Image (spheres, rainbow, N blue to C red):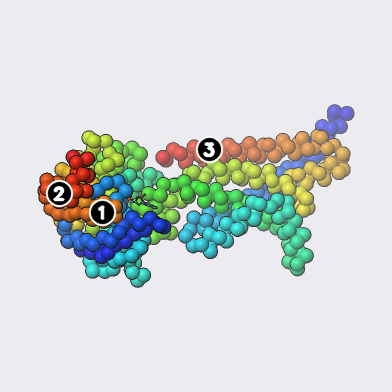
Amino acid sequence: MIKVEDLHKSFGELEVLKGINEEVKQGEVVVVIGPSGSGKSTFLRCLNLLEDITAGKVYIEGEQINSPQADIDLIRQETGMVFQHFNLFPHKTVLDNITLAPIKVKRLNKKEAEKIAYELLEKVGLKDKADSYPSQLSGGQKQRIAIARALAMQPKVMLFDEPTSALDPEMVGEVLGVMKDLANEGMTMVVVTHEMGFAREVGDRVLFMDHGIVVEEGDPEQIFTNPQEERTKEFLAKIL
Amino acid sequence: MLADKMEILKESIPFLLKGAFMTIELTTFAVVIGIILGTILGLARVSHNKLLNGIAKAYIEFFRGTPLLVQLFLLYFGLPNIGIDISAYFAAILGLGLNSGAYVGEVVRSGIKSIDKGQMEAARSVGMSYPQAMQYVILPQAIKRVIPPLGNEFIALLKDSSLVSVIAVKDLTRQGRLIISRTYESFLIFAAVAVLYFIMTFIMTRIVNYAERRLSISD
Ligand SMILES: Nc1ncnc2c1ncn2[C@@H]1O[C@H](COP(=O)(O)OP(=O)(O)O)[C@@H](O)[C@H]1O
Ligand SMILES: [Mg+2]
């Protein structure tokens, strides 16, 4: 599904990703953990080309996305992204947030787009909020709408960048619940999160990143209970 | 004595009003040019195309860094000198419009820059192209932020339009000076001219405030 070969990313002089090799299978849920500044967001953002890739190759379904011939807008349609700070469009209603891209990008008519949107609102449990504006929603609700917005483009992969870390604790569960449902439906997901419960329950594999490389990876149970690398142990000691 | 002055004022009013309408007309055309040109310049200033960006920057710096009066002279006296004929009326609209475009360009640029980067990223992440993201996500939000500074820009433009009186356009200021050259009532007439300018800017301020309030309701 996703294949990453020797991925490097620099911001000017600063090398943030120093050679990442990974493969994510169809339907797999990969959880990325690691200290702040280790390059987790940058890694995720390279997967949908929100950052341009300095060196290396990224393939999605066999197609190299960082080649000059690749259609970036098309690639982004197929990789949904959920951000830490939601980034809903504040000037549009919930319904319009969800239908905007299907209408403008996929050229669906309003009716088709709204049908999909209502199904997704049902799925994230916010059907009654269709006509609300983002400013009228709680953080947890905003994030569930953001997930619905990404799903409306019917992506093949979903990328989550710390989707619950800007939320009040009591709202974390509702968002993780939606993500769990999605995983159970077979969505391929790459999730940056420090929610260990989620990682254990839903994750198929955990990557521990530090200083721009994947230091250790493996089965969630193994990483959390029996990490091999010193750096992983130190990090887990801090957050658990 | 007082009755004489009242009589002069009364006779002057139709001319002054005619001038005021000319001022409004010039300002309106200049605002239209300013908005169109300024939007293009503002978009160029935030684009990653270095050439476009550089051209827009040079344009804005030139028009903001030179006096409007000199720009008007350049158009009205300078162009005919190199073989391009231009009427005073057209030179006035063009001068005010080109000048206004530079200021509007800066306002549009900072309005776009003030929108959180996450908005562009979210729009791109669902597959929108850069122009689509601008059109449907960034600009609609930026418009709300630029209304107040744009309003101030256009009020300043209306006042600055009095400069066109020196290139023989019969705006409010020019009409005032013509009346004074016949009546020698400088104080009375310039006071009337000032009052008319004030009424126009006063109304414009209310319109801008109203627009600002209307736009903030939908937040
Ligand atoms: N646009 C950018 N320009 C310059 N440096 C950046 C940029 N984005 C991220 N960085 C730097 O890259 C490093 C990794 O950042 P990030 O991927 O956000 O880490 P994480 O998500 O693991 O906290 C940090 O040192 C950060 O300061
Ligand atoms: Mg991050």
**Residue, x 77% and y 35% (percent of image)?**
B191
Residue A230 visible within the image = yes
Q: Which numbered marker is on residue B210?
A: 3
Task: Sort mark 2 into few (<14), some (14-19) or many (20+) by Cα contacts within 10 Å.
Answer: some
Label 2: element kind: loop
Nearer-the-camera pick, A232 or A63:
A232
Q: Answer left or right for A15 relative to B97.
A: left
Task: Kindly report the distance in space between the C-alpha atoms of the residues bearing marks 3 and 1.
Answer: 43 Å
**Residue, x 48% and y 58% (percent of image)?**
B47
Task: Sort mark 1 into few (<14), some (14-19) or many (20+) by Cα contacts within 10 Å.
Answer: many
Amino acid type, label 2: Pro
Amino acid type, label 3: Tyr
Q: Quadrant of residue B59?
A: bottom right
Nearer-the-camera pick, A178 or B6:
A178
Q: Quadrant of the N terminus of chain B?
A: top right
Total labels: the figure holds: 3
Q: Quadrant of the C terminus of chain B?
A: top left
Q: Chain of mark 3?
A: B
What residue sits right under mark 2 in the picture?
A: A227
Q: Answer left or right for B10 relative to A172.
A: right
Amino acid type, label 1: Leu
* x and y percentages locating residue B69 in the rendered image: 73, 51
